[in-house]
Image (spheres, rainbow, N blue to C red):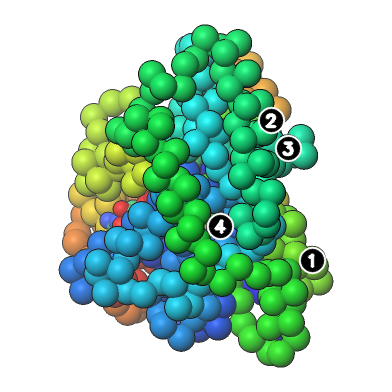
């Protein structure tokens, strides 16, 4: 079997968790391949809401195996809290969850480094989630990191102390005293103790050579969906660098983050909102800093799942969307939160950029540094509540036109439209 991939095409929070949950019954395995607890994937069903940070969104189907792959970075404290929360809702995540031995650990001091680096950047700060993502991937690449498999080895404590010491040296240079800082409202010392308790809890979960497990499963005819975190415009290579995360959020990240060869990649499912949002700093050409932006935020409840920060809102950016489709080789599109546009008379879409008097139909290198002015195409809104529609033949004409416009521009078929946060609020398009 080939592995399908689901990923965000914008700046994250497209609704990936919801679609993974919707599609999970079709797959034997759901696997996260990059990122860490900077992600917040929301799943809503039976009037219950879950926000997952590290655990794959297939966890609600007891017949599906969920894997946290080698490309993911794990904070045991946050991970354990996630397991406990699920348990409190009657979901035993431990039973169908596997961890890669090669996934790297986020140490408490990685989080302090994240905070120190961000405050040192001043106005140029990334707007990081402060979960220690950048420093942990830095240590991975610099060959200093500690991996999940190491927690089972005798020299783990020694490794921990040595890496922590390195971090404290760096923190000193930033005049950053660990004991003065809270992590998730907990003093550093106490957090560190809880982190070690959580390490013991991790040992209850099966820790495996996930690359072998995955390839053997595919050989045996099992189906797998790789679940992306963040979005293509936050990719460390192809996003709006330096305002990005520290991992490859794109299709290629699946090969390195799970150990799957490119020959084994099947469908690539691209998730996008019917408009755009971004949380944190960085360029956002179609951003609306006016009442319409506020209306999108209000109607879409656009506040971060991980940090609670208000998300910046704007119109759909087709130049960026087409770029993401190209980088990822997207074969099917999923349009989310169409219902948020229910009340808009006119829906605008960015189709080109103006940069220094020139019209561009691509994302230029300069996008990271200079203002791009979007050229907008205006379409008629549907001005009706679409939240209860479940059949594509029932969608209003203006929505059908919006879909047609996007399909014509991207040359990729739309597989589903999402019309509300609940698992059931889906319109299959075929
Ligand atoms: P993810 O990080 O890509 O999984 O997305 P998030 O969970 O961070 O953000 C998506 C938000 O939109 C969550 O609050 C979802 O419950 C919500 N959501 C998902 N799909 C829809 C939809 O079609 N309509 C509306 N109104 N909300 C949605
Ligand atoms: P999901 O998976 C939206 C953003 C942060 C910041 C930048 C770098 O829920 O879509 P980091 O903590 O990774 O160093 O932050 O990336 N960011 C996200 N924005 N959704 C996410 O994940 C994000 N993960 C990171 O806001 O701008
Ligand atoms: Mg999110």
- Residue 367: % across, % down: 62, 26
Residue holding disc 2: 364
Numbered disc 1: secondary structure: helix
Separation (CA) of disc 2 from disc 3: 34 Å
Numbered disc 4: secondary structure: loop
Establish whether ligand 2 lies closer than 8 Å to the Cβ of label 3: no
Please indicate whether residue 204 sits to the left or right of residue 185 in the image.
Answer: right
The quadrant of the rendering that contains the N terminus is: bottom right
Determine contact: label 3, label 1, CB under 8 Å: no
Determine contact: label 4, label 3, CB under 8 Å: no
Lower sequence index among marks 2 and 1: 1
Separation (CA) of disc 4 from disc 2: 24 Å
Examine the rendered structure and indicate whether residue 134 appears above or below residue 339. above
Q: Nearer the viewer, mark 4 or mark 2?
A: 4
Disc 3 packing (10 Å; few <14; some 14–19; many ≥20):
some
Residue holding disc 3: 144
Please indicate whether residue 329 sits to the left or right of residue 7 in the image.
Answer: right
Say if residue 220 shows up in the picture. Answer: yes
Lower sequence index among marks 2 and 3: 3
- Residue 50: % across, % down: 30, 61
Question: Which is nearer the eye, 324 or 225?
Answer: 225
Determine contact: label 4, label 2, CB under 8 Å: no
Lower sequence index among marks 4 and 3: 3
The residue lying at 68 percent from left, 57 percent from top is 153
Residue holding disc 1: 262
Lower sequence index among marks 1 and 4: 4
Say if residue 350 shows up in the picture. Answer: no
Please indicate whether residue 423 sits to the left or right of residue 159 in the image.
Answer: left
Question: Which is nearer the eye, 360 or 204?
Answer: 204
Establish whether ligand 2 lies closer than 8 Å to the Cβ of label 4: yes
The residue lying at 41 percent from left, 22 percent from top is 179
The residue lying at 64 percent from left, 48 percent from top is 156
């Amino acid at each position: 079997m080939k592995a399908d991939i689901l990923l965000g095409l914008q700046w994250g929070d497209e609704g990936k968790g919801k679609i993974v949950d919707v599609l999970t019954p079709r797959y034997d395995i759901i696997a996260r391949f990059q990122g860490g607890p900077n992600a917040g994937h929301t799943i809503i069903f039976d009037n219950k809401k879950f926000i997952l940070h590290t655990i794959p969104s297939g966890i609600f189907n007891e017949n599906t195996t969920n894997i946290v792959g080698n490309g993911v970075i794990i904070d045991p404290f946050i991970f354990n809290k996630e397991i406990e929360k699920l348990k409190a809702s009657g979901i035993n995540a431990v039973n169908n969850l596997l961890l890669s031995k090669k996934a790297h650990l986020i140490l408490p001091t990685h989080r302090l480094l994240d905070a120190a680096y961000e405050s040192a950047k001043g106005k140029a700060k990334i707007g990081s989630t402060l979960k220690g993502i950048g420093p942990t991937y830095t240590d991975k690449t610099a060959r200093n990191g500690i991996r999940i498999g190491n927690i089972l080895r005798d020299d783990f404590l020694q490794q921990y102390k040595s890496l922590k010491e390195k971090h404290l040296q760096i923190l000193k240079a930033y005049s950053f005293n660990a004991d003065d800082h809270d992590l998730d409202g907990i003093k550093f010392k106490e957090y560190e103790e809880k982190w070690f308790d959580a390490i013991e809890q991790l040992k209850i979960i099966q820790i495996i050579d996930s690359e072998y497990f995955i390839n053997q499963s595919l050989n045996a005819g099992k189906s797998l969906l790789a679940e992306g975190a963040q979005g293509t415009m936050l990719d460390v290579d192809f996003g709006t660098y330096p305002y990005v995360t520290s991992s490859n959020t794109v299709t290629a990240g699946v090969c390195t983050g799970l150990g799957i060869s490119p020959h084994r990649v099947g469908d690539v499912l691209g998730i996008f909102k019917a408009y755009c949002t971004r949380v944190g700093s960085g360029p956002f050409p179609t951003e609306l800093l006016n009442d319409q932006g506020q209306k999108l935020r209000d109607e879409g409840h656009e506040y971060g799942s991980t940090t609670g920060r208000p998300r910046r809102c704007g119109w759909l950016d087709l130049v960026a969307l087409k770029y993401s489709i190209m980088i990822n080789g997207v074969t099917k599109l999923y349009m989310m939160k169409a219902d948020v546009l229910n009340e808009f008379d006119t829906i605008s879409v960015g189709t080109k950029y103006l940069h220094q008097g020139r019209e561009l139909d691509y994302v230029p290198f300069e996008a990271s540094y200079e203002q791009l002015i979007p050229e907008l195409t205006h379409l008629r809104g549907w001005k009706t509540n679409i939240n209860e529609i479940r059949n594509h033949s029932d969608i209003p004409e203006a929505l059908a036109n919006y879909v047609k416009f996007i399909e014509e521009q991207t040359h990729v078929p739309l597989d589903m439209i999402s019309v509300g946060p609940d698992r059931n609020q889906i319109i299959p398009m075929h």
